[in-house]
Image (cartoon, grey):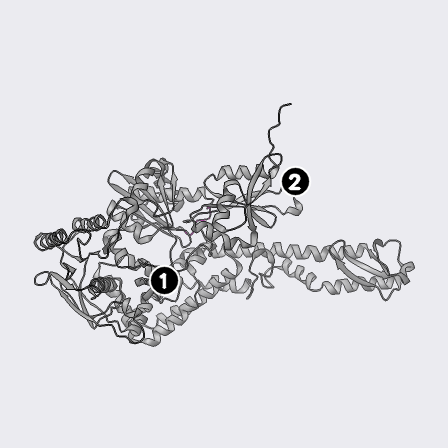
Amino acid sequence: MAKKDPQETPMMKQYNRFKAQYPGALLLFRVGDFYETFGEDAITASKILGITLTKRHNGAASETALAGFPHHALETYLPRLVRAGQRVAICDQVEDPRFAKKLVKRDVTELVTPGVTYHDSVLDFNRNNYLAALCQQKNRFGLAFLDISTGEFLASEGPREAIEKLLHSFEPAEVLFSKAERSAYQEWLGDKFPVFYLEDWFFKPEFGYELLTRHFQTTTLKGFGVEDYPLGIAAAGAILHYLSENRQTNLAHLNSLSRLDESRYVWLDQFTIRNLELLFPQQPGGVALVEVLDQTQTPMGARLLRKWMALPLKERARIEERHAIVQKMLDEPELGEAVSELLRQCGDLERLISKVASRRIKPRELLQIKKSLGVVGLLQALLQTHAETTKYAHQINPCTFLFQKIENELLAEPKALTHEGGLIRDGVNTELDELRHIVRHSKEYLEKARQNAIAETGISSLKISYNKVFGYYLEVTNAHRDKVPKSWIRKQTLTSAERYITEELKVYEDKIVNAEEKIWTLEQGLFFELVGHTADFVQPIQQNARVLATLDCLNNFAHLARKYRYVRPQLHEGLRLEIKAGRHPVIERQLPGEAPFIPNDLCLDPENEQIIVITGPNMAGKSALLRQVALITLMAQIGCYVPAESAQIGLVDKIFTRVGASDNLARGESTFMVEMMETASIMNNLSPQSLVLMDEIGRGTSTYDGISIAWAILEFLHNHPGRAKHFCYALSRAE
């Protein structure tokens, strides 16, 4: 007899259907109180999460690998899966198992990827979580960034070097590419970022234009300033398409697309960002500049500070506007302290309002929005009392109507989840108040039923109790059993008593039990109505978040200046760079005890002192001085005060560094080759307003060859018509 083909169980058929819809995702399948994974997903999950891998029988089919964890542990395990680069489809039970006639209905409620998530446990509060999309047409590239957790949406376009610089500045959590360009992108970026490949036609400018105008409900994109970025538009459109595939439908907080014009900011290539350790330390246990400068009070401020550091300004007026606010906070420390105190009370408005728009907000998070709006009102009043900060006061909207509505409707201490009840105040809904009256006075209802039963039977010892099997019941001792009316229904016999139910008791029970369920349903509905009202204020609250973040950064700069003796740099359009008693902002903070940092003077002038060559033995501080000059210049141009006695800084448009020795043997690149590639990048991108810092070029080859290379570079920079205005070069005595 022929062997029958193995048959799938109904549940596995359901699982396989969802798995086919999301082939590239690890599927978390809700089964009772557990999330289960099967097959290859189970093997992957067990390795990443360190959970037990078992087997189950799939009906008559062969054994299938199985791994799972309790549903309440999702917030623990989900971040580990996402940070391992997994795309995770969460399949939940969308039907109460108690009312399911056959198989419980399930659906994928969320697809979480490294670049698309609202989960606090996955996100870093102090950093943006960008999803990027990249497309190419000949030698020009389009790039878009989206942080769905904040609503920030950016588009840019330019040559490969500019786009590569932005990628390394923004450090996206996930990058979208065209399948047609898979091999080219892999060769370019390797495994630097988690990637996902889409069909080529999703990266067409026409497709992106249509998606974006439909989303923003406009006929053109001219109002966003990106009309002349067709490839940037294509990349932004690919992101929107990806969101729709990820079941992200509530996107009201994505209400603008901003032009990211790289030419407005100081050029910092990927090597400079790495060498200066602006955002990340190069070595384990190291300290990046951002760790020293970030003493902000809010997550919004911390995220904005990282962006300012990656994109220093070139416009003197904008920089000095920041310096003026910092000076105001320094001159009036009580103002700075008052601003700090109010900011400390603010929640992460940027991410909270995004959760409102996506309908993912929890009751206590909505309460945090109300509290933050109260702080915003106080901050606005404070800023209006000072001429220098009035501008920010006018940009704030305290959303008084929304504050009052949440205050009047949401309990002061609501439950954590919407299905638990305990969310809405009394007096908001008449039906809710009536149902609560029934529940609160249930003892009175039951006592009335007991008294009626006593009056009917004359059994004064009669009791009313409850169990899960048959609800409320009357208990009569055997001594009074003969007095029980025939209309009572016996449910249970005990050694010394019998238990009964009556029609009146069941009516009361239905009222009480149904009232509790109706209360939960009503409260949930009223809460989501309140969330809907809050969603009408997405744009003003996002604007408030931007103002708070800006104030937080500037007040933070004033705090640093006061705490670490930083001074206001004097900016000018000239070519002279003069720093007196400059200090390295990171090293001086790492010195043990009271050990002083020995300051250094430096003066660079293209006409008289364009090039400085610093000599000395190893560990003499040559590299530290080079980095110090770059960091002071950069700090000045983000609006921060600087660690020096005084600093006169002619604005620079590019900062280049070639510091430290490294190799990339995995890609066949020796130390010398890496060094020459970085040097070539500098030579090919110089401008008359560049600051160039090089440390021992040619150390990866023979001494004489190294000196020849360094000599040629010095002559080129000195004699070339488009020479850099400032150049510092360090070499050891061995050279």
Horizontal arrangement in the rendering, residue 300 relative to residue 464 (left or right): left
Residue under circle 2? 102
Is label 1 in a helix, a strand or a loop?
helix
Q: Nearer the viewer, residue 273 or 422?
A: 273
Q: Residue furthest top?
A: 1
Residue 302 disc label: 1
Which quadrant, please, contains the N terminus? top right
Horizontal arrangement in the rendering, residue 420 relative to residue 476 (left or right): left
Q: Is residue 249 magenta?
A: yes
Which quadrant, please, contains the C terminus? bottom left
What's the magenta region? 248-253
Q: Is residue 111 magenta?
A: no
Give the x, y percent position of residue 421.
60, 59
Residue at image x 21%, y 48%? 673
Residue at image x 31%, y 62%? 288
491 over 667 or under it: above or below = below
